[in-house]
Amino acid sequence: MKYQAQCHDAYALAEYVEKIFIPAMKSKGAGYQQGYRKAARYVAEYAGRDIEVAAIQGALLDAFRHWLIDNKGLAPTTAENCFYKVRRIAEHATRSPGQPGDIDRGELGEWFEESFAPQRLTGLTKDTWRRYRRTIDVFGGFLRRPPKLSDLAPFQLKDFDAWCRTFFNPSIRPDTKNIHYVSILSLARHAHSSLFPERRGSGLHKPVARDHALLALPERSLLRYLFEHYLPSRDVSPRYACDAAKYVKVFDNWSGGATVDDLTGELLGQYVDHLEAKGCSRKTITNNRGLLLSLWRHAHDQYATDRKPEAVRMPSKDIPERQTGWKPEQVARLLRECQKLTGWIRDGVKRGDYFDCVIRIGWDSSLRLGDIFKLDAESILPDGRLLVVLEKEARPHTAYVHPSTLATIRRIAPDGDEHPLAWPFGVKAFRAQFHALVKAARLVGSFTTLRSSSDAQCRQTRSQMPPELPTVDELKGGAK
């Protein structure tokens, strides 16, 4: 949403929303606009009159948020959404785009803007900056005052996590991470490294996997050794930690609770035979075998077992590699459904052409949605290269697309548009529309399935890119 920075302090809030704010929301739907009207009515009800935009300051906003919960009876998440709508209106009236609003984030907010963000978030998207600012706001709501740096204490953060799970957002399951707690913990580790020693293998945007109920496991069990010794000593991603826990748990069930001392070449060979008889793919067997051998070597190096690692046979080469994901003809079916879409996502860009373009880029390059949305005009080169800084890994990456995909990008991207592939409605809306397309094409999966299918095709053909998809004209000709 591109706001125009103007000073309209003399406007009443409801009048400003109708005359200035909503007309600036060119591409937003009626339901989205109604939410801002409702937020303005709540403010008038709280204040007892229709107050001016200039009166919406940090103290009033904080009191308004608590009034929504305590007096109005709204759920904490609903009250938080209403609070952010009012704050966004105030920012639109008094600030230029990209600058923080007038909410009082206290000493912690000043430290975030001056120290943490320039050092740790440079090169990342504005959504990441916005997430941390919102976490500071939620932390202030927990404290019921502007937060200070001294509030980042271990006992305070534990209470904050419990408050988020029981009061602010009770829908957070015990086995899932609390994103606000993860963000505030990153701030605490940066501000007070002695109080929050960062475990090896965990980065700012790579929270380590949540510990299991280790005390209920036998002292020498493989799963307990995995979480207490193996993973903390290695630089691994959360995905690897979850896969490792799954592999070890399956082996533990098969072996009847084998310990570190029970690992032998014969036992692991029997496990390989079991996986082959079970019908697992060669890749799955290789991954299981490699992890267990790595765990065994680590235990021997750390003197946790006296038995030296032994050779374990590789899985048979006769096991056929399973075809996973979608085939090119299935993706082409998905593109035909895109041609049936009606409407526009913005001036000059049809909804069907936009989804067709994003699907082609995802198939050719295996980029994530967030990386595709933030592609700018300068990063799309005429030879089909896409220069992007991957948001998840925070590193530069060069992707490639076919000439037909490049032509599709040029067709929907007007000259001078800084981010031609930006999606204006939020990721959830895109995923919902994509799910409808997948269902209409009689397929099962998500955008992640599209990316994994592309990788599988590259491995199968041993090429840098998957097969080229039919062009739009070929799709229309086939439909006829």
Image: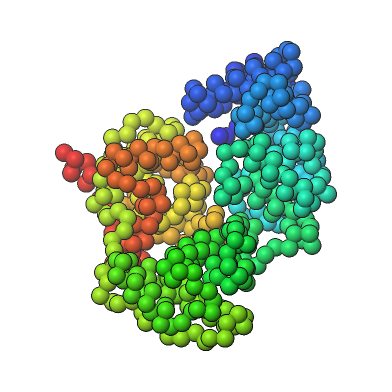
| Left-right relation of 222 to 198 | left
Q: Quadrant of residue 61?
A: top right
Question: Which of the two residues, 349 or 208, is positioned nearer the viewer here?
Answer: 208
Determine the residue positioned at 30% across, 53% down. 326
Residue 359 rendering spot, x and y as whole percentages = 36, 48
Q: Quadrant of the C terminus?
A: top left
| Left-right relation of 406 to 131 | left
What colour scheme governs how the chains and residues are painted in the rendered image of this protein?
rainbow
Residue 158 rendering spot, x and y as whole percentages = 72, 49
Residue 140 rendering spot, x and y as whole percentages = 75, 38
Judged from this view, the residue extending furthest toward the top is: 49
Whether residue 206 can be seen here: no
Q: Quadrant of the N terminus?
A: top right
Question: Which of the two residues, 346 or 359, is positioned nearer the viewer here?
Answer: 359
Determine the residue positioned at 70% across, 52% down. 185
| Left-right relation of 210 to 263 | right
Question: Which of the two residues, 477 or 415, is positioned nearer the viewer here?
Answer: 477
Residue 465 rendering spot, x and y as whole percentages = 34, 62
